[in-house]
Image: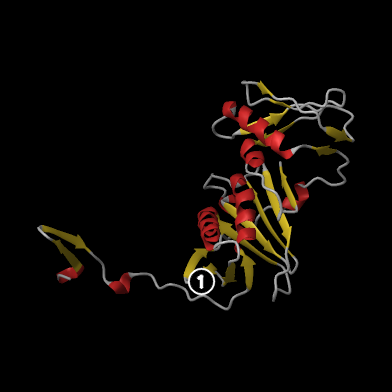
Amino acid sequence: MLENHWVEIVSDKKKYKLVGMAKENFPALPVMPHTLVKIPAPILENLIGKTKFAISMEESRYTLNGGLLILKPDTLAMVATDGHRLALAETDHKLTGLNGEVKVLIPKKAMDEVEKLSSAAGTDAQIEFAKDESHLFFQVGHRLLISRILTGQFPNYEAVLPRDNNKNVVIERTELSDAVRRVSQLADQRSHAVKLARFERRHRDFRFEPGIRRSQRNHREGIQGASRSPSVSIPATCWISWAPPPMDRSASS
């Protein structure tokens, strides 16, 4: 250590000098409060993985630059939207010690790090979650992640969820995933959208039209309640990254 906080490193015939800073200038880390709840790492990883694709990349839409984590005594949910599409993942799991509903907005970068933390922790790991007025805390063993809470009002996502829907489609998951993987090669590089162009009771097929470039893959599946030929644009990443339980419900639009 040299004067004015300079650091000298010597190795064999090599010598380096680096400018440093006084330790007093390093920001004080907030102290983790009492653990609010323990969340199984695989569940939290799964919730994040199924919703983060819908997070807005526009910095001006501050409250949409992350995901809404909803904790209830018997359920967990994660919601994300960019204003054009919405992803909701929800699962049933009893959270010991939680008596009411807790909602927190987690920044996207923090979600990415929590996902990595959960993945590395193992299938039996529990993530200790806590919060104060401005920070979120995720701890696994000796590893602690601290993030600022996104402030602002998250949109009322429940208002756009379909109600009294009478149209049900039974699709073989592997075949649909394979079909989307093929046609997504022609999808728009920004939105990665794949258009589910039509349902037909007679032919029972699915046609995917990525933008002006077309690719078609037919499936023979059962369709209930469809008297016309609806169409919808679905992000290819939503279908490709879809995974089986523990998620009970997953929706995107």
Residue pushed farthest bottom?
A: 34
Locate the C terminus and report the quarter of the image it occupies: top right
Quarter-of-image position of residue 102: bottom right
Residue that carries the numbered disc 1 in the rendered image: 141
Callout 1 crowding tier (Cα within 10 Å): few <14, some 14–19, many ≥20: few
The residue lying toward the viewer, choosing from 131 and 170, is 170
- Identify the residue at image location x=54%, y=31%: 189
Return the x and y of residue 27 as percentages of the image width and height.
38, 70
Q: Residue flagged by tag 1: what amino acid is it?
A: Gly
- Identify the residue at image location x=63%, y=54%: 46
Return the x and y of residue 249 as percentages of the image width and height.
75, 51
- Residue 84 visible to the viewer: no
Q: In the rendered view, tell whether residue 198 sits above or below residue 154.
A: above
Return the x and y of residue 78 as percentages of the image width and height.
66, 56
Count of marks placed on residues = 1
Q: In the rendered view, tell whether residue 167 sits above or below residue 50.
A: above
- Identify the residue at image location x=31%, y=74%: 24
Q: Secondary structure at mark 1?
A: loop
Locate the N terminus and report the quarter of the image it occupies: bottom left
Q: In the rendered view, tell whether residue 206 sits above or below residue 177.
A: above
Quarter-of-image position of residue 92: bottom right
- Identify the residue at image location x=24%, y=65%: 20
- Residue 187 visible to the viewer: yes
Q: Is 125 on the left or on the right of 169, as rendered?
A: left
Q: Is 155 on the left or on the right of 41, as rendered?
A: right
Return the x and y of residue 139 as percentages of the image width and height.
53, 69
